[in-house]
Image (tube, rainbow, N blue to C red):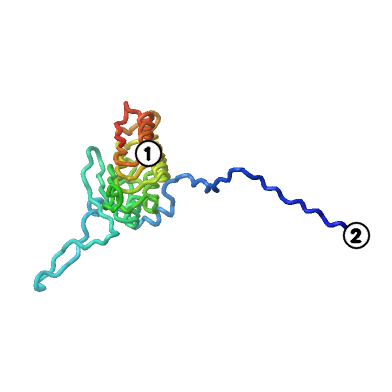
Amino acid sequence: MVPSAHVVPTVVPLGLPVGPVQPPPPPPLTGLTADDRAAAAPAAVSDWAAACAPRKVSKSSWFGLGRKEVDAPTNSDELRMRVARPAEGEGIALEAVVSSDASMLQLAQRLAATSAAAPVAALRLTADDGYGPGTMAEVDAMSAGFALLTRCLMVTDGAGCLDALRELSISKITIGNEEAGQLATALTGHASLRSLELWNVGLEDEGALSIAQLATASGNTALSQLNLGRNLISGHGKELLEAMIDASRVHAKVY
């Protein structure tokens, strides 16, 4: 008679900590790809003033006596832009209002497709008021449009029209820690950026610390103004920011 095999049960160690499975790290941030540029090509701008002018439509006058041109009606997803004069130097100041991820993508594609022949010296981006804390808009940085905008801002392989950017202001668009880190990566080493404002964007400690790397003694030498006002930075975070920012070179607002 053949004895039955003795089966030894598998011993599972008890009491060992079991942590969550961590996702792989995101790929390193790169500039605009060939696909980005091809998709954006139809949105190229040669004259920002013309691109920002209201669209006109022809409308019949009273009693059908002739026709006249009036501003075309806008829809809720439409990008609104206007040109202002920059504080100094060449280029234009582009003020853009987005109301949705679709309009954010419209803006990013225009920037991606536009060359240095139509330079933007100041980019001021905001969103329509929403219903959250601080009237923050219902637009956030976790969108294809904001990701494309970040690639446009890259020092290498970014949008040609932003090569000489001197001022960047973003307000009322929720920016998470990861998106803030990518934005900081894109702007690292920017030779002309003097003023950076992320106002009322829901920035937390981790994201604020990523951005503040640009204002350290070894950060962007051209940067002289940093505004991180009306965000979600803790008291301890503010202390860390004040310690790392080079106050002799950068005038910073953190609250």
Query: What residue is shown at x 29% (from left), y 39% (from top)?
Result: 229
Q: Can residue 154 be seen in this view?
A: no
Q: Position of residue 142 (x, y in %)?
A: 39, 51
- Please tell me whether mark 1 or mark 2 is closer to you in this view: 2
Q: Where is residue 240 in the image (x, y as percent from the top left)?
A: 39, 32
Q: Residues within 10 Å of mark 1 (few under 14, many from 20)?
A: many
Q: How crowded is mark 2: few (under 14 residues within 10 Å), some or many (20 or more)?
A: few
Give the farthest residue toward the front: 15
Mark 2, residue position: 1
| Residue that appears at 34% across and 41% down | 232
Circle 2 SS class: loop
Give the residue type that dot 2 points to. Answer: Met
Q: Mark 1 points at which residue?
A: 208
Q: Earlier in the sequence, mark 1 or mark 2?
A: 2
Q: Which residue is drawn at 39% across and 54% down?
A: 144
- Which image quadrant: the N terminus? bottom right
Out of 152 and 41, give the one closest to the viewer: 152
Instruction: Classify residue 228 by image quadrant.
Output: top left
Quadrant of the rendered structure where residue 254 is? top left
* Residue 14 percent across, percent down from the top left: 64, 45
Residue at the right extreme, as displayed: 1
